[in-house]
Image (tube, coloured by chain):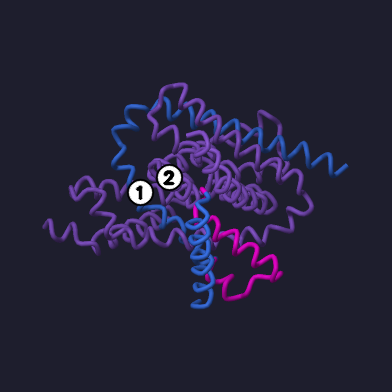
Chain colours: A blue, B purple
Amino acid sequence: MVNALLIILCCQFTGEMIVHFSGVAIPSSVVGMVILLVGLIIKGSVPDDLDKTTSEFIKYIGLLFVPAGAGVSLYLNLIAEQWLVILAASFTATIATLILTAYAFKLLEKKRGT
Amino acid sequence: MEYILSYPLTSLIVTLGAYSFSVWLQKKAGSHSLLNPVVITIGLAVIFISMSGIGYETYMEGANFIHFLLGPATVALAVPLYKQLQMIKKQAIAVITSVLTACFISGFLAWFIASQMGAAQDIQLSIISKSVTTAIAIGIAEKIGTASSLAVFFVFTTGILGTLFSSFIFKIVKIDEDKAVGFSLGATCHGLGVAKAFQKSETAGAFSVLGMSLMGLVSGILMPLVILFFL
């Protein structure tokens, strides 16, 4: 548990340093994720300890969205004012993405399979 | 009373308590997907903030302890992605093309419609990451300097809309393959899509996890770069 946390925090820390000193516009936690992914690919397997800790972490990841999500209390008026735009944009883009992504996958998968 | 309400531990207890209650509620109601525990917890937190009158900033003094864990949790997402990597090898072209399609269509179309219909700047920017898994969508919002709370709102709106209509949509366009449907659900509707895909089959579920993690990774890298380039 402690070792796994140490690995995760070091990846995040390195990500933060890379973003800070290079000025690249990528969230530092995403850079940390890439570092861990590359590490796992090089190692070729997931250590047991890391596997357990991360799956426990991810199980409760929903809870971690609450503080940021609760900030919506500052935007309730804006959402009420612009609900039609929000609904139109969300709905159209969501349906289009669902269809086109599945279609692209199906099309290319077939070409390879047959 | 004001002291009690604005004490950091109070926000922390309220948030954890609300989450625990929401998880219980969803189980009690037969795991109905519309009763998403995160959505209900956010709703309860919003009610707490406005009823107590403490304001969001005071609430965050306590809730920040939870918020801080988002970074490590995002890094941890590398593990499920790594486990699905074998699947990419067999389907590399399909996977890479589909994830780029999802990234471009969801981001561009949502931004385009919002800007054409005159949405506020904050909405235009935070709606771009609507199909990205929440932890990374928050990271993107913070990077491009828009409201991360709106980003969370759009992520969940997308997840709910998408999973409500997906069965109907896939029937109309006649796509029923487990892999394609699963991948698309994960890439478009992130965690909610993954839950939906596992109801279809194990294969659909596995591909939805792949879709969600890759979509998060690719969007986390590309979206801030593209947005900040045009801003």
User: Residue furthest toward the top?
Assistant: B117
User: Residue furthest toward the bottom?
Assistant: A2
Q: Is residue B84 above or below residue B156?
A: below
Give yes or no for contact between labels 2 and 1 (Cβ–Cβ under 8 Å).
yes
The residue tagged 2 is B152
How far from the left and from the top, in percent, is residue B207?
67, 50
Question: In the image, is B35 to the left or to the right of B91?
Answer: left
Q: Which residues are magenta?
A: A25-54
How far from the left and from the top, in percent, is residue A86?
43, 30
Residue sitting at x 63%, y 62%: A37
Ranked by sequence position, the earlier of labels 2 and 1 is 1
Residue sitting at x 61%, y 60%: B80
For the residues marked 2 and 1, what is the alpha-carbon distance in whole angstroms? 10 Å
* Secondary element at tag 2: helix
Residue sitting at x 74%, y 58%: B86
Question: In the image, is A23 to the left or to the right of B81?
Answer: left
Q: Quadrant of residue A64?
A: bottom left
Q: Is residue A76 above or below residue A42?
A: above
The amino acid type of the residue labelled 1 equals Ile
The amino acid type of the residue labelled 2 equals Val
- In this rendering, the label closer to the viewer, 2 or 1: 2
* Mark 2: few/some/many CA within 10 Å (<14, 14-19, 20+): many
